[in-house]
Image (cartoon, helix red, strand yellow):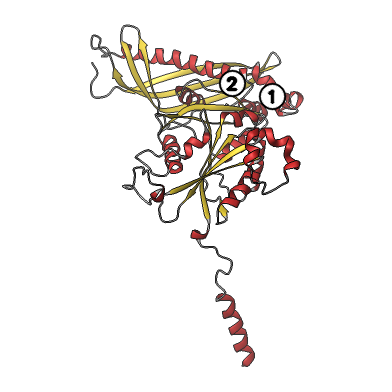
Amino acid sequence: MKVVVYLQLLAISVLLSGCWDSTQIDDRALILGLAIDEAGPEASKKEDLANHKERDVKQLNKNMIRLTAQIAVPGRVPLGPGNGGSSDSKKSSPVWVVQVVGHTIEDAMNNLQQEIADPRFLEHLRIIVISENIAERGLDDLNDVFRRNAQVRRSTWLLVTDTKASDLMEVAPPLERVPTLYVLSMLEKSVEMGKFPEMYLSHFWNNGSKLGQNPFLPYISIREGENILINGFAFFRNNKMVGTTSSPIEIGVYMAAKGINPGGYTVLFPVQDTGYVMVRAKKRKSYTKVRIQNGKPHADIDVYIHGELVEKLSANTNIDTTLDLKKIEEEQERRTTMAINDLIKETQKVKSDIFGLGEYVRAHERSYWNENVRAKNDWENLYAGMSIHVNVKVNIRRVGMKVK
């Protein structure tokens, strides 16, 4: 009987052990966003030397980075709407912005830890912003350190900006007091509205790992101090930024070529004998076929766009026949075809296959692929000279309540 009692007590003691290794959330430094800029060789004079001796990193001094972290202040992060509006008082700010320098990202992160009391925690990291200079220099270090860290979510957004990346850690428009949460909300709602394709950190890494595709990242700008513009794409090759799109409308062009839904872009263009009109894409479909032609890969991209007429600027003309609608459809087909071809040529110039045409060749022309592609740069050279035919078909299904 005593043996049974002892066994029961032993079993109960296991259940009563609780979370012996738990850490309270208030005892962690919750990092919401990171910004990475170039620091320059003069930054070595301000370094804390927390991870190395000065003599050991002399060759790295010219490539130092400046890391800016946005850390949530417990109890001050708003949990719902109605708490917007920025405040000049640092005491009431929901975030704490800390800036450090380092030779590598992990070196800078360790220097950051030297300046904050609580252990850093990256599971709530949602936004990583890098400057153009960092992107052009290469992301090998960034990919390595964040891939190894189990706390970093694969749904984190990685962005490239044409300004100082640290500036985005301070942007706080009236709609949201927390800059990182505002940028995150803007990106996720853009995906929902068909303004931008999903491009999380996991997508960037996956596309970079494919032999027949190159990755891209959102390219953003700051307008009037506190407005953020999604300016387009930043193209990558060999983990280095090699170019950017010239205007935001090219995001819609790419999504049309890839058949990504929902449709969210509205285009303004002139139509002969009708004037200027605006047509919104509601749904897109795309079919890509590849074949080997004269010993070289060739692709046919067929794009189908279902749209609606949302505005007609000229009051002197009417749209009251199917022939009038046909003119608008044909003009949009011509302009969309030109825009897709221009974007393809732009990416071919820098040998960055963001469309993933190499993956189609790899899947459907396996013998050709095995004979001609040994490494990723082999496909990039083939893509630069690849012939691509684009065919666009537009169908305007709705014209609104008013036709004339």
Return the residue nearer the eye: 377 or 73. 73
Q: How far from the left and from the top, in percent, is residue 357?
A: 61, 25
The residue identified by callout 2 is 347
The residue tagged 1 is: 379
Q: Where does the C terminus fall, quadrant-wise?
A: top left
Residue type, label 1: Trp
Q: Position of residue 155 (x, y in %)?
A: 53, 43
Residue 81, percent from left and from top = 33, 47
- Three-letter amino acid code at the position of disc 2: Thr
User: Quick one: label 2, few (<14), some, or many (20+) residues within 10 Å?
Assistant: many
Report the residue that reaches farthest toward the front.
45
Q: Residue furthest top?
A: 273
Residue 26 vs residue 388, the one in the foreground: 26
Count neighbours of disc 1 (C-alpha within 10 A) and say few if under 14, some if 14 to 19, many if 20 or more: many
Residue 253 point in image, percent of width and height: 48, 22
Q: Quadrant of residue 10?
A: bottom right
Which residue is rendered at x = 66% and y = 47% of the image? 148
* On screen, residue 160 above or below 337: below
Q: Secondary structure at mark 1?
A: helix
Which element is circle 2 on? helix
Q: Is residue 186 left or right of residue 44?
A: left
Q: Earlier in the sequence, mark 2 or mark 1?
A: 2
If the image is split into quadrants, where does the N terminus sit? bottom right
Occupied quadrant, residue 370: top right
Instruction: Place residue 382 in its image quadrant.
Output: top right
Given residues 107 and 199, the one toward you in this image is 107
